[in-house]
Image (cartoon, rainbow, N blue to C red):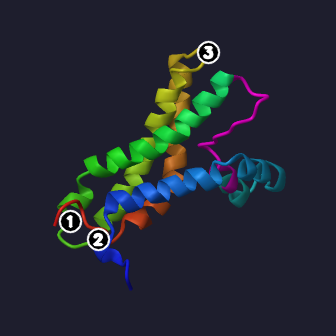
Amino acid sequence: MALGNRYKSAPGAGTLAALILVLVFGSPWYAEWASENTNPDTAGGWWLRLLAWPRWSFDSSDSLRDILVGDLKAILLVLLTLLFLFLLPGSQLARARGTISQFFAGWASYIFAGGFAALLTTLFLANPSLLGAFQAAGNGAAYGLFVGWIVGFATLGGYRGTR
């Protein structure tokens, strides 16, 4: 196996997983499909719709501010995931690669990134409020809680920085 866990860094793999999640499930095509073909009153339908939370778009019918805030949320989600993967010490302190601490560090970084990305982008809305910022951060953290395990699995087995 040419590219096994030996060459995979935990922050790089987690960031790549976050980027794929945002690009695929945050796309306008997936969001439209999920809203038309899933039932929000079922657990599966709710989760498939939740996957589209960091929605990015380039629709000309939306206002420029809404497009920028949505796109900024998706970009910040990926960048903050990378930042938190470097800052969370769980995978740094693990003596062996692939330990459960790497999984939880990846998952937690996505929860924090979702909450902070939503909180920061709320500041750019037309009429930002403290209540709106708290509600957006809660929605972002809920997204990270229910989707972040994918990033957690992606970080398993990676090395942490220099050897």
Helix, strand, or loop for circle 1? loop
Q: Between residues 47 and 15, which one lies in front from this camera angle?
A: 15
Helix, strand, or loop for circle 3? loop
- Indicate which disc, 2 or 1, sits on the residue closer to the N terminus: 1
Give, as a three-letter code, the residue at label 1: Ala
- Indicate which disc, 1 or 3, sits on the residue closer to the N terminus: 1
Report x, y in % for residue 37.
82, 56
Residue highlighted by disc 1: 94
Chief secondary structure of the magenta portion: loop
Looking at the rendered structure, which numbered label has been put on residue 99?
A: 2
Looking at this rendering, what residue extends furthest in the top direction? 127
In magenta stretch: residue 17 = no
Q: Are marks 2 and 1 in contact (CB under 8 Å)?
A: yes
Report x, y in % for residue 143.
55, 47
In the picture, which quadrant includes the C terminus?
Answer: bottom left
Give, as a three-letter code, the residue at label 3: Ala
Range shown magenta: 48-63
Number of callouts in the render?
3
> Which is in the foreground here, disc 3 or disc 2?
3
Looking at the rendered structure, which numbered label has been put on residue 126?
A: 3
